[in-house]
Amino acid sequence: MGLKVRKAVFPVGGLGTRFLPATKAMPKEMLPVVDKPLIQYAVEEAAAAGIEEFIFVTGRGKTAIEDHFDHSFELEYTLQQRGKQEEYQSLSSLIKLPGSISYIRQQEPLGLGHAVWCARHLIGNEPFAVLLADDFIYSSTPCLKQMIDVYQSGVMVAVMNVESRHVNRYGIIDILEESQKQIKVKAVIEKPSPDEAPSNLAIIGRYILDAKVFEHLSRQESGAGGEIQLTDALSPMIHEMPFYGYRFDGVRYDCGSKGGLLAASIAVALARDELREEVVNELSKVMPQSINPV
Ligand code: UTP
Protein backbone atom coordinates (compact mmCIF):
# COMPACT_ATOMS: atom_id res chain seq x y z
CA MET A 1 0.00 0.00 0.00
CA GLY A 2 1.32 3.45 -0.91
CA LEU A 3 1.08 6.65 1.11
CA LYS A 4 -2.42 8.05 1.52
CA VAL A 5 -3.10 11.27 -0.42
CA ARG A 6 -5.67 13.28 1.55
CA LYS A 7 -5.15 16.86 0.41
CA ALA A 8 -5.43 18.58 -2.96
CA VAL A 9 -4.36 22.03 -4.09
CA PHE A 10 -6.30 23.87 -6.79
CA PRO A 11 -4.25 26.80 -8.10
CA VAL A 12 -6.77 29.32 -9.37
CA GLY A 13 -4.74 32.50 -9.00
CA GLY A 14 -3.85 33.00 -12.69
CA LEU A 15 -5.08 35.97 -14.70
CA GLY A 16 -6.66 33.99 -17.52
CA THR A 17 -5.57 36.57 -20.07
CA ARG A 18 -6.41 34.31 -23.02
CA PHE A 19 -10.09 34.61 -22.17
CA LEU A 20 -10.28 38.36 -21.72
CA PRO A 21 -12.67 40.12 -21.59
CA ALA A 22 -14.71 37.15 -20.28
CA THR A 23 -12.30 36.79 -17.36
CA LYS A 24 -12.12 40.44 -16.39
CA ALA A 25 -14.51 40.10 -13.46
CA MET A 26 -14.93 36.32 -13.43
CA PRO A 27 -12.28 33.65 -12.80
CA LYS A 28 -11.31 31.49 -15.76
CA GLU A 29 -12.03 28.42 -13.61
CA MET A 30 -15.72 29.40 -13.48
CA LEU A 31 -16.09 29.08 -17.26
CA PRO A 32 -18.61 26.29 -17.88
CA VAL A 33 -18.35 23.09 -19.86
CA VAL A 34 -22.07 22.74 -20.70
CA ASP A 35 -23.55 23.48 -17.25
CA LYS A 36 -20.75 23.03 -14.73
CA PRO A 37 -17.77 25.28 -14.13
CA LEU A 38 -14.32 23.85 -14.79
CA ILE A 39 -13.41 24.07 -11.11
CA GLN A 40 -16.38 21.91 -10.13
CA TYR A 41 -15.27 19.10 -12.46
CA ALA A 42 -11.81 19.26 -10.84
CA VAL A 43 -13.21 19.19 -7.30
CA GLU A 44 -15.50 16.26 -8.18
CA GLU A 45 -12.53 14.42 -9.67
CA ALA A 46 -10.52 14.95 -6.48
CA ALA A 47 -13.40 13.82 -4.27
CA ALA A 48 -13.82 10.69 -6.40
CA ALA A 49 -10.13 9.96 -5.81
CA GLY A 50 -10.61 10.06 -2.03
CA ILE A 51 -9.36 13.60 -1.36
CA GLU A 52 -10.67 14.94 1.97
CA GLU A 53 -9.19 18.46 2.12
CA PHE A 54 -9.54 20.96 -0.72
CA ILE A 55 -7.17 23.93 -0.80
CA PHE A 56 -7.79 26.71 -3.29
CA VAL A 57 -5.00 29.16 -4.05
CA THR A 58 -6.95 32.17 -5.21
CA GLY A 59 -6.22 35.74 -6.22
CA ARG A 60 -8.11 39.00 -6.40
CA GLY A 61 -11.46 38.78 -8.16
CA LYS A 62 -11.95 35.08 -7.44
CA THR A 63 -14.72 35.29 -4.84
CA ALA A 64 -17.17 33.65 -7.27
CA ILE A 65 -15.32 30.38 -6.57
CA GLU A 66 -15.86 30.69 -2.81
CA ASP A 67 -19.54 31.48 -3.37
CA HIS A 68 -19.92 28.53 -5.73
CA PHE A 69 -18.92 26.05 -3.02
CA ASP A 70 -21.14 27.61 -0.36
CA HIS A 71 -24.86 27.77 0.37
CA SER A 72 -26.99 30.25 -1.51
CA PHE A 73 -29.92 30.39 0.91
CA GLU A 74 -32.18 32.57 -1.20
CA LEU A 75 -31.71 30.43 -4.30
CA GLU A 76 -32.08 27.15 -2.39
CA TYR A 77 -35.24 28.40 -0.65
CA THR A 78 -36.78 29.55 -3.93
CA LEU A 79 -36.00 26.27 -5.71
CA GLN A 80 -37.61 24.30 -2.88
CA GLN A 81 -40.66 26.56 -2.84
CA ARG A 82 -41.09 25.97 -6.57
CA GLY A 83 -40.63 22.22 -6.27
CA LYS A 84 -37.49 22.22 -8.43
CA GLN A 85 -35.96 19.20 -6.70
CA GLU A 86 -33.45 18.25 -9.38
CA GLU A 87 -31.99 21.75 -9.54
CA TYR A 88 -31.94 21.91 -5.73
CA GLN A 89 -30.04 18.60 -5.56
CA SER A 90 -27.49 19.86 -8.10
CA LEU A 91 -26.62 22.63 -5.65
CA SER A 92 -26.51 20.58 -2.47
CA SER A 93 -23.80 18.29 -3.89
CA LEU A 94 -21.49 21.34 -3.90
CA ILE A 95 -21.40 21.61 -0.13
CA LYS A 96 -18.43 19.82 1.41
CA LEU A 97 -17.97 18.85 5.06
CA PRO A 98 -17.52 21.96 7.21
CA GLY A 99 -13.82 22.76 7.49
CA SER A 100 -12.71 20.71 4.50
CA ILE A 101 -12.27 23.66 2.11
CA SER A 102 -9.62 26.35 2.62
CA TYR A 103 -8.75 29.43 0.62
CA ILE A 104 -5.28 30.96 0.49
CA ARG A 105 -4.49 34.16 -1.35
CA GLN A 106 -1.66 34.35 -3.83
CA GLN A 107 -1.24 38.11 -3.65
CA GLU A 108 0.61 38.30 -6.96
CA PRO A 109 0.32 35.82 -9.86
CA LEU A 110 4.03 34.96 -9.94
CA GLY A 111 3.56 31.54 -11.53
CA LEU A 112 2.19 28.06 -10.87
CA GLY A 113 5.16 27.11 -8.67
CA HIS A 114 4.56 30.16 -6.51
CA ALA A 115 0.84 29.35 -6.25
CA VAL A 116 1.59 25.82 -4.99
CA TRP A 117 4.18 27.19 -2.53
CA CYS A 118 1.48 29.47 -1.05
CA ALA A 119 -0.28 26.31 0.23
CA ARG A 120 2.76 24.98 2.16
CA HIS A 121 1.46 25.63 5.69
CA LEU A 122 -1.84 23.92 4.96
CA ILE A 123 -0.14 20.87 3.46
CA GLY A 124 2.51 20.34 6.15
CA ASN A 125 4.58 17.22 5.59
CA GLU A 126 2.50 14.77 3.60
CA PRO A 127 2.06 13.92 -0.08
CA PHE A 128 -0.62 15.96 -1.83
CA ALA A 129 -2.31 16.33 -5.20
CA VAL A 130 -2.38 19.38 -7.47
CA LEU A 131 -5.16 19.76 -10.05
CA LEU A 132 -5.29 22.44 -12.73
CA ALA A 133 -8.95 22.95 -13.50
CA ASP A 134 -8.29 24.22 -17.01
CA ASP A 135 -6.86 20.82 -17.95
CA PHE A 136 -10.22 19.11 -18.33
CA ILE A 137 -9.85 15.32 -18.54
CA TYR A 138 -12.78 13.28 -19.77
CA SER A 139 -12.44 9.65 -18.69
CA SER A 140 -14.44 6.80 -17.23
CA THR A 141 -12.12 6.52 -14.19
CA PRO A 142 -11.20 10.02 -12.99
CA CYS A 143 -7.57 10.79 -13.88
CA LEU A 144 -6.47 11.55 -10.30
CA LYS A 145 -8.00 8.28 -9.10
CA GLN A 146 -6.06 6.35 -11.75
CA MET A 147 -2.88 7.95 -10.38
CA ILE A 148 -3.63 7.56 -6.66
CA ASP A 149 -4.46 3.88 -7.24
CA VAL A 150 -0.85 3.20 -8.32
CA TYR A 151 1.01 5.90 -6.34
CA GLN A 152 3.47 4.57 -3.76
CA SER A 153 5.65 7.56 -2.79
CA GLY A 154 7.64 10.43 -4.31
CA VAL A 155 6.36 12.34 -7.34
CA MET A 156 3.88 11.30 -10.00
CA VAL A 157 2.82 13.57 -12.89
CA ALA A 158 0.14 12.91 -15.51
CA VAL A 159 1.62 12.79 -19.02
CA MET A 160 0.41 12.53 -22.59
CA ASN A 161 1.92 12.79 -26.06
CA VAL A 162 1.46 16.18 -27.71
CA GLU A 163 2.26 17.33 -31.22
CA SER A 164 6.00 18.03 -31.55
CA ARG A 165 5.35 21.61 -32.65
CA HIS A 166 3.49 22.25 -29.36
CA VAL A 167 6.16 21.04 -26.89
CA ASN A 168 7.08 24.66 -26.11
CA ARG A 169 3.74 25.04 -24.27
CA TYR A 170 4.44 22.32 -21.69
CA GLY A 171 6.82 20.77 -19.18
CA ILE A 172 8.35 17.89 -21.17
CA ILE A 173 9.83 14.71 -19.70
CA ASP A 174 12.87 12.73 -20.75
CA ILE A 175 12.13 9.00 -20.40
CA LEU A 176 14.46 6.69 -18.46
CA GLU A 177 12.30 3.58 -18.80
CA GLU A 178 8.67 2.75 -19.39
CA SER A 179 6.58 -0.05 -17.98
CA GLN A 180 2.86 -0.18 -18.76
CA LYS A 181 1.44 3.24 -17.93
CA GLN A 182 4.26 4.31 -15.61
CA ILE A 183 7.34 6.06 -16.92
CA LYS A 184 10.48 6.49 -14.86
CA VAL A 185 11.61 10.04 -15.52
CA LYS A 186 15.21 11.01 -16.35
CA ALA A 187 14.69 14.80 -16.65
CA VAL A 188 11.99 17.46 -16.96
CA ILE A 189 12.30 20.63 -19.03
CA GLU A 190 9.82 23.51 -18.97
CA LYS A 191 8.69 24.80 -22.36
CA PRO A 192 11.60 23.56 -24.52
CA SER A 193 11.80 24.49 -28.19
CA PRO A 194 10.96 21.57 -30.51
CA ASP A 195 14.71 21.05 -31.25
CA GLU A 196 15.65 20.90 -27.54
CA ALA A 197 12.76 18.68 -26.42
CA PRO A 198 13.89 15.18 -25.37
CA SER A 199 10.42 13.73 -26.21
CA ASN A 200 6.92 14.91 -26.95
CA LEU A 201 5.58 13.59 -23.64
CA ALA A 202 4.04 16.55 -21.83
CA ILE A 203 3.09 17.05 -18.19
CA ILE A 204 -0.65 17.68 -17.87
CA GLY A 205 -2.29 19.39 -14.89
CA ARG A 206 -2.52 16.49 -12.42
CA TYR A 207 0.31 15.93 -9.95
CA ILE A 208 0.96 13.97 -6.78
CA LEU A 209 3.82 15.66 -4.97
CA ASP A 210 6.04 15.00 -2.00
CA ALA A 211 6.11 17.92 0.45
CA LYS A 212 9.84 18.27 -0.21
CA VAL A 213 8.82 20.29 -3.27
CA PHE A 214 8.29 23.27 -0.93
CA GLU A 215 12.02 23.35 -0.11
CA HIS A 216 12.80 23.76 -3.79
CA LEU A 217 9.99 26.25 -4.35
CA SER A 218 11.14 28.37 -1.42
CA ARG A 219 14.15 29.46 -3.48
CA GLN A 220 11.62 31.42 -5.57
CA GLU A 221 13.71 31.16 -8.73
CA SER A 222 11.93 32.37 -11.82
CA GLY A 223 12.18 30.34 -15.02
CA ALA A 224 10.48 30.30 -18.42
CA GLY A 225 8.41 33.44 -19.03
CA GLY A 226 9.82 35.03 -15.84
CA GLU A 227 7.40 32.91 -13.75
CA ILE A 228 8.19 30.66 -10.79
CA GLN A 229 7.64 27.34 -12.51
CA LEU A 230 6.52 24.15 -10.78
CA THR A 231 8.49 22.03 -13.27
CA ASP A 232 11.77 23.72 -12.24
CA ALA A 233 11.17 22.78 -8.59
CA LEU A 234 10.37 19.20 -9.59
CA SER A 235 13.56 18.77 -11.60
CA PRO A 236 15.98 18.18 -8.64
CA MET A 237 13.49 15.78 -7.04
CA ILE A 238 14.20 13.24 -9.80
CA HIS A 239 17.47 12.47 -7.96
CA GLU A 240 15.89 12.47 -4.50
CA MET A 241 12.92 10.11 -4.70
CA PRO A 242 10.84 7.88 -7.03
CA PHE A 243 9.64 10.10 -9.89
CA TYR A 244 7.13 8.79 -12.41
CA GLY A 245 5.07 10.02 -15.32
CA TYR A 246 1.66 8.35 -15.64
CA ARG A 247 -0.01 7.86 -19.01
CA PHE A 248 -3.64 8.33 -18.03
CA ASP A 249 -6.67 6.90 -19.84
CA GLY A 250 -8.97 9.64 -21.08
CA VAL A 251 -9.17 12.62 -23.37
CA ARG A 252 -7.69 15.91 -22.19
CA TYR A 253 -8.99 19.27 -23.37
CA ASP A 254 -6.92 22.40 -22.86
CA CYS A 255 -9.68 24.58 -21.49
CA GLY A 256 -7.20 27.40 -20.92
CA SER A 257 -7.54 27.96 -24.67
CA LYS A 258 -10.67 28.99 -26.52
CA GLY A 259 -10.63 26.08 -28.98
CA GLY A 260 -10.11 23.57 -26.16
CA LEU A 261 -13.01 24.90 -24.10
CA LEU A 262 -15.35 24.81 -27.10
CA ALA A 263 -14.24 21.27 -28.02
CA ALA A 264 -14.78 20.07 -24.43
CA SER A 265 -18.27 21.59 -24.37
CA ILE A 266 -19.21 19.88 -27.62
CA ALA A 267 -17.77 16.52 -26.52
CA VAL A 268 -19.59 16.58 -23.17
CA ALA A 269 -22.86 17.73 -24.78
CA LEU A 270 -22.67 14.96 -27.39
CA ALA A 271 -22.16 12.40 -24.63
CA ARG A 272 -25.34 13.49 -22.84
CA ASP A 273 -28.52 11.78 -24.02
CA GLU A 274 -30.78 14.77 -23.40
CA LEU A 275 -28.54 17.11 -25.41
CA ARG A 276 -27.10 15.03 -28.25
CA GLU A 277 -29.84 15.45 -30.84
CA GLU A 278 -30.22 19.18 -30.33
CA VAL A 279 -26.46 19.74 -30.47
CA VAL A 280 -26.02 17.65 -33.63
CA ASN A 281 -28.82 19.61 -35.31
CA GLU A 282 -27.37 22.95 -34.29
CA LEU A 283 -23.86 21.97 -35.34
CA SER A 284 -25.05 20.80 -38.74
CA LYS A 285 -26.50 24.27 -39.29
CA VAL A 286 -23.30 26.10 -38.46
CA MET A 287 -21.08 23.58 -40.27
CA PRO A 288 -22.29 23.49 -43.88
CA GLN A 289 -20.68 20.83 -46.10
CA SER A 290 -18.55 23.48 -47.78
CA ILE A 291 -16.56 24.07 -44.58
CA ASN A 292 -13.94 21.39 -44.25
CA PRO A 293 -12.24 20.81 -40.94
CA VAL A 294 -8.54 21.85 -41.00
P1 UTP B 1 -1.89 29.33 -16.98
O1 UTP B 1 -0.53 29.11 -17.49
O2 UTP B 1 -3.01 28.79 -17.78
O3 UTP B 1 -2.04 30.90 -16.74
O4 UTP B 1 -1.94 28.74 -15.51
P2 UTP B 1 -3.29 31.84 -16.52
O5 UTP B 1 -2.76 33.13 -16.03
O6 UTP B 1 -4.34 31.21 -15.66
O7 UTP B 1 -3.95 32.03 -17.97
P3 UTP B 1 -3.46 32.87 -19.25
O8 UTP B 1 -2.29 32.12 -19.81
O9 UTP B 1 -3.14 34.26 -18.81
O10 UTP B 1 -4.66 32.84 -20.16
C1 UTP B 1 -2.14 27.36 -15.23
C2 UTP B 1 -2.83 27.22 -13.90
O11 UTP B 1 -2.05 27.78 -12.86
C3 UTP B 1 -2.77 28.76 -12.15
C4 UTP B 1 -3.89 29.20 -13.09
O12 UTP B 1 -5.00 29.70 -12.37
C5 UTP B 1 -4.19 27.92 -13.85
O13 UTP B 1 -5.06 27.07 -13.13
N1 UTP B 1 -1.87 29.87 -11.79
C6 UTP B 1 -1.01 30.37 -12.72
C7 UTP B 1 -1.90 30.39 -10.52
O14 UTP B 1 -2.69 29.94 -9.66
N2 UTP B 1 -1.06 31.40 -10.21
C8 UTP B 1 -0.18 31.93 -11.11
O15 UTP B 1 0.58 32.85 -10.75
C9 UTP B 1 -0.16 31.40 -12.39
Image (spheres, grey):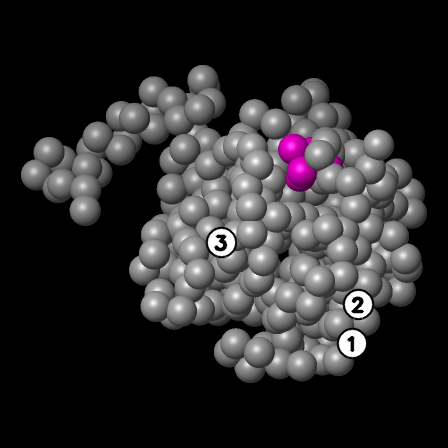
Viewer can see residue 268: yes
Which tag, 1 or 3, sits closer to the chain's start? Answer: 3
Q: Would you say the residues marked 1 and 3 are in contact, meaning their CB atoms lie under 8 Å apart?
A: no
Q: Secondary structure at mark 1?
A: loop
The quarter of the displayed image where residue 200 is located: bottom left
Q: Which residues are magenta?
A: 144-148
Q: Nearer the viewer, residue 242 or 139?
A: 242
Residue 152 rendering spot, x and y as whole percentages: 78, 40
Label 1 sits on residue: 218
The answer to which of marks 2 and 3 sits earlier in the sequence is 3
Say which residue label 2 marks.
Answer: 214
Give the farthest residue toward the front: 177
Task: Look at the picture and state if 10 lies above or below 266.
Answer: below
Name the image quarter holding the N terminus. top right
Residue that appears at 55% across and 41% down: 178
Residue 102 place in picture, x, y as percent = 84, 55
> Disc 1 marks which amino acid?
Ser
92 or 222: nearer the eye? 222
Looking at the picture, how far across and down is residue 288, in whole percent?
13, 35
Per the model, the C-alpha gap separating discs 2 and 1 is 6 Å
Q: Residues within 10 Å of mark 3 (few under 14, many from 20)?
A: many
Kindly identify the amino acid type of the residue bearing the numbered disc 3.
Ala
Separation (CA) of disc 1 from disc 3: 25 Å
Label 3: element kind: strand
CA–CA distance in space, label 2 to label 3: 22 Å
Q: Which residue is mark 3?
A: 202
Answer whether labels 2 and 1 touch (C-beta < 8 Å).
yes
Residue at image point 46% right, 23% down: 272
